[in-house]
Amino acid sequence: MTESTDRQAFAERYGALFEHSPWVVRRAAEFLPLEDLHAGLMKVVADATPEEQLALIRAHPELAGKAAIDGTLTEASAAEQAGAGLDRLTPAEFERFHALNAAYRDKFGFPFIICVRLTDKAGILAAMERRLGNDRETEIATAIEQIGEIVRLRLESIA
């Protein structure tokens, strides 16, 4: 196998780890072999430009949002949201998610991100309400941290 083939195989195997952002894995492939896969991937995110980081954050769907309703979530996101019960919301819960998603996006300019596999509906709603009090820089850092948790769990499930 050539170095180029190794990078291509790596990109194909891990390309879907980051929502609609295969560039992270492609860029990490340039540094193969990686001593710690997760750390190497997250270093690419940390070293990305602020614009690239925002694009990565914005590539994520809103929780219980339009993509969930119209069935356009990625397979991983659909499974993760279903695991947290977001596919089985009461009308009142749905309205609360919708209102919080809108308030969050209006304030920060990107969707609320949380690793739903580590919480439940009530925990997500509480985090949305609490994090609305943060400043934008804190939320960008928190979103990237949460993306890291999402990717860590996705890696564990394919390892």
Image: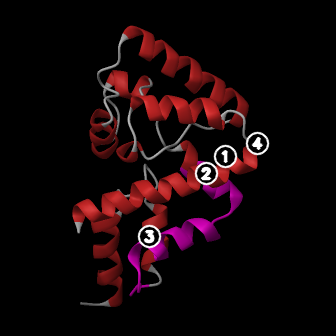
Q: Is residue 52 visible?
A: yes
Asked whether 125 or 7 is in front, the reply is 125
CB within 8 Å, label 1 to label 4: yes
The residue that mark 1 highlights is 139
The image position of residue 109, as x and y in percent, is 68, 36
Asked whether 14 or 141 is in front, the reply is 141
Give the residues drawn in magenta, as a range.
32-56
The image position of residue 14, as x and y in percent, is 33, 65
Give the spatial CA distance, label 3 vs label 1. 26 Å
Q: Count residues near mark 4 (Cα–Cα under 10 Å), then give few for <14, some for 14-19, many for 20+.
A: few
Please, which residue is most extreme toward the bottom here?
A: 2
CB within 8 Å, label 4 to label 2: no
Quadrant hosting residue 71: top left
Q: Residue at x 48, y 63 (%)?
A: 23
The residue that mark 3 highlights is 26
Circle 2 SS class: helix
- Residue 135: mark in rendering: 4
Q: Which label's residue is closer to the chain start, 3 or 1?
A: 3
Q: Amino acid at mark 4?
A: Asp
Give the spatial CA distance, label 3 vs label 4. 31 Å
CB within 8 Å, label 2 to label 1: yes
Quadrant hosting residue 131: top right
- Residue 142: mark in rendering: 2
Q: Amino acid at mark 2?
A: Thr
Circle 1 SS class: helix
